[in-house]
Image: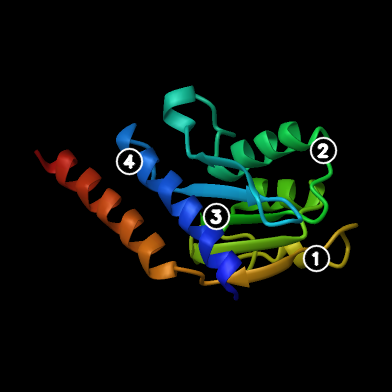
């Protein structure tokens, strides 16, 4: 882990907080190019967009590809507040992202280290450098507070 990873994760956490404003699950993502410049950032928009693929990672990857004018995100780093699911981990590999930095592990759907290891599966044509646990406490806190509030609303 390095300072650039923490700075990129701070951008992802800012996106996660924006997700709270629109009552989405607070997951944020940010992509930096090979020079370390943030070129894309997004948060979950599944409910707002009525789109099951509108995960923070997917939206940030799409925006980064548009910013670079190429689907290959070679040399890029993606930071996301929660360990990516199967869909997002697959997109990370297909986009040729060099490094994935994530905050909290996801015991229910994590496809990078927890349930699966898609980003480093030798059968695939690309492998991703993975840095886990960056600012995990803040990522977990946002998620826990969100779901506690959702449960409290359900009891009323």
Picture coordinates of residue 10, whole percent (x, y): 46, 57
**In 3D space, how far apart are the residues under numbered discs 1 and 2 (Cα atoms)?**
21 Å
Q: Which residue is mark 3?
A: 80
Residue 84 higher or lower than 70, as above or below: below
Could you tell me which residue is drawn at 28 percent across and 50 percent down?
147
Q: Give whichever of 128, 79 is nearer the camera.
A: 79
Q: Give whichever of 109, 57 is nearer the camera.
A: 57
Residue 20's tag is 4
Q: Give whichever of 116, 126 is nearer the camera.
A: 126
In terms of sequence position, does the residue under pointer 4 or pointer 2 come before the other? 4
**In 3D space, how far apart are the residues under numbered discs 3 and 4 (Cα atoms)?**
16 Å
Could you tell me which residue is drawn at 76 percent across and 63 percent down?
128
SS for callout 4: helix
**In 3D space, how far apart are the residues under numbered discs 4 and 2 (Cα atoms)?**
29 Å
Q: Which residue is mark 2?
A: 71
Q: Residues within 10 Å of mark 2 (few under 14, many from 20)?
A: some
Q: Residue furthest bottom?
A: 1
Q: Residues within 10 Å of mark 1 (few under 14, many from 20)?
A: some
């Amino acid at each position: 882990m390095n300072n650039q990873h923490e700075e990129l994760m701070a951008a992802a956490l800012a996106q996660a907080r924006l997700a709270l404003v629109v009552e989405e699950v607070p997951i944020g993502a940010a992509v930096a190019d090979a020079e370390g410049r943030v070129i894309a950032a997004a948060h979950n928009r599944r409910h707002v967009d009525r789109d099951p693929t509108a995960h923070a990672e997917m939206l940030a990857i799409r925006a980064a590809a548009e910013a670079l004018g190429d689907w290959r995100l070679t040399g890029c780093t993606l930071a996301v507040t929660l360990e990516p699911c199967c869909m997002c981990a697959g997109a990370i590999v297909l986009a040729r992202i060099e490094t994935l930095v994530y905050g909290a592990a996801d015991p229910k759907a994590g496809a990078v280290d927890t349930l699966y290891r898609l980003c480093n599966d030798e059968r695939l044509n690309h492998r991703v450098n993975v840095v886990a646990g960056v600012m995990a406490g803040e990522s977990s806190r946002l998620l826990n507070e969100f779901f506690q509030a959702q449960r409290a609303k359900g009891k009323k």
